[in-house]
Image: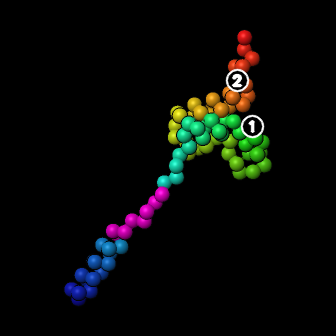
């Protein structure tokens, strides 16, 4: 009986000790934000018909936002016509 309890305890503890390696996806940053801003018009049209999203939900924060705005300004000519 002691042997059975000891073996089951060893198996339970051994099964809890294994942790599978998880590779975290890389979050989009500043330069990916610029690229997404540049292609925002085309992804907006695609989003009407497919599951493509215009803006990355899993971004890295303010740097992605800044890159997205800069990319959109480059594509749409933001401020170039102001005198």
- Label 1 sits on a secondary structure element that is helix
Q: For residue 33, which quarter of the picture? A: top right
Which residues make up the magenta segment? 16-23
Q: Position of residue 12 (x, y in %)?
A: 32, 75
Closest to the observer: 76 or 15?
76
Marks 1 and 2 in Cβ contact (< 8 Å): no
Closest to the observer: 9 or 31?
31
Circle 2: is it few (<14), some (14-19), or many (20+) Cα within 10 Å? Answer: few
Vertical position of residue 21 compared to residue 72: above or below:
below
Q: Quadrant of the N terminus?
A: bottom left
Q: Position of residue 37 (x, y in %)?
A: 66, 35
- Residue drawn at x 23%, y 87% as measured from the top left: 3
- Residue drawn at x 52%, y 49% as measured from the top left: 26
For disc 2, the marked residue is 78
Cα separation between marks 1 and 2: 14 Å
Q: Position of residue 82 (x, y in %)?
A: 72, 14
Mark drawn on residue 7? none
Residue 21 within the segment the image draws in magenta: yes
Q: Which sits earlier in the primary sequence, circle 1 or circle 2?
A: 1
Circle 1: is it few (<14), some (14-19), or many (20+) Cα within 10 Å? Answer: some
Q: Position of residue 50 (x, y in %)?
A: 75, 51
Q: Main secondary structure of the magenta part?
A: loop
Left or right of 49? Residue 56 is left
For disc 1, the marked residue is 41
- Label 2 sits on a secondary structure element that is loop
- Residue drawn at x 27%, y 83% as measured from the top left: 7
């Amino acid at each position: 009986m002691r042997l059975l309890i000891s073996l089951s305890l060893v198996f339970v503890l051994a099964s809890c000790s294994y942790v599978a390696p998880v590779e975290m996806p890389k979050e989009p940053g500043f330069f990916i934000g610029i690229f997404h801003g540049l292609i925002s018009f085309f992804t907006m049209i695609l989003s009407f018909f497919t599951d493509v999203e215009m803006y990355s939900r899993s971004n890295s924060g303010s740097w992605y936002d800044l890159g997205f705005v800069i990319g959109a300004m480059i594509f749409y000519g933001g401020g170039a016509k102001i005198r």
